Image (cartoon, helix red, strand yellow):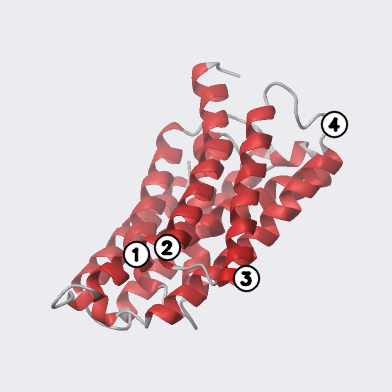
Amino acid sequence: MFATVPASIAICCYVTAVVFLVRHISETNAPRQALFFAWAGVVLQGGYVVAGAQAVGGFNFGFFNTAALVSWIVALLILIAAITKPVAKLGVVIFPLAALMLGLDLAIGEYNRLLSAQGWPMTLHILTSIVAFALMNIAALQALLLAFQDQQLKSHPPKRFAQSLPSLQAMESLLFQILSVGVLFLSVSLVTGFIFIEDLFAQHLAHKTVLSILAWLLFVGLLLGRRRYGWRGQTALFWTLGGFVLLLLAYFGSRFVLEFLLRR
């Protein structure tokens, strides 16, 4: 019950951060108040995660618990990256999502699947999978923001928000940096899955495995195409979003079916 206090305050902090971001959306740099409240939300949600894990003897990675954890990692990565890179404005989407997922976890997240019961090999597989998905979340949002910026710069006059963003070249470079790190974690996740999971193509894992491999192929293909052919723009957008949708279906589609439709 005590853990709900930091979680509730974290939700308020996320919402407050979004208010400051929206009020200063046309400015080049994110306001300090927004970053302060966002960091407060991330720290408090981290406290909620730790308190919940201690209460049940391990991390609960049921559907809503995992969704809340992913949104927390995404928010944390955004804030860390914002120290040196122009990604703080992604918080307009990320922080409300983190607040929503945390609220749903508080209200509904009762399904117990403890990470501590899996052993270190499965723990490594699960954690790298979660981090990979979190990074691809950021990449997908960055790709959408890049497409919006490109469209706005072609119109006359572009909106002040688009003008406040870094150059297209810098935004594209950031997108492919995020994708590269995400592919690294996704690769580790797939390798550890093949090594440590006895039957990765079992009936309840087959679609997740196939979708994850297809997503990996899309992301790797995009990185190779960027390196060899200079792919960018709409090509980067479609490949990034396509890979993200495949991961979304792999990570949460199967979990939703198992936990809420099949009740397993």
Left or right of residue 199, residue 37 in this image: left
Circle 4 residue: 198
Circle 3 residue: 228
User: Where residue 11 sits in the image (x, y, percent)?
Assistant: 36, 54
User: Where residue 230 sits in the image (x, y, percent)?
Assistant: 54, 72
Looking at the rendered structure, the secondary structure element under dot 2 is helix
Instruction: Estimate the spatial distance between the alpha carbons at disc 3 and disc 2, rounded to whole Å.
Output: 20 Å
194 up-or-down from 256: above or below: below
81 up-or-down from 189: above or below: below
- What type is the residue that disc 2 sits on? Ala
Q: Quadrant of the C terminus?
A: top right
Which disc number belongs to residue 245? none
Q: Nearer the viewer, mark 3 or mark 2?
A: 3
Instruction: Estimate the spatial distance between the alpha carbons at disc 3 and disc 4, rounded to whole Å.
Output: 37 Å
Looking at the rendered structure, the secondary structure element under dot 4 is loop
At 64% from the left and 64% from the top, the residue drawn is 224
Q: Residue furthest top?
A: 262
User: Where residue 255 sits in the image (x, y, percent)?
Assistant: 56, 30
User: Where residue 141 sits in the image (x, y, percent)?
Assistant: 41, 59
The reply to whether callout 1 and callout 2 are in contact (CB within 8 Å) is: yes
Is residue 46 at least partly visible in the picture?
A: no
Instruction: Estimate the spatial distance between the alpha carbons at disc 1 and disc 4, rounded to whole Å.
Output: 42 Å
The reply to whether callout 1 and callout 4 are in contact (CB within 8 Å) is: no
Which one is earlier in the sequence, the residue at label 1 or at label 3? 1
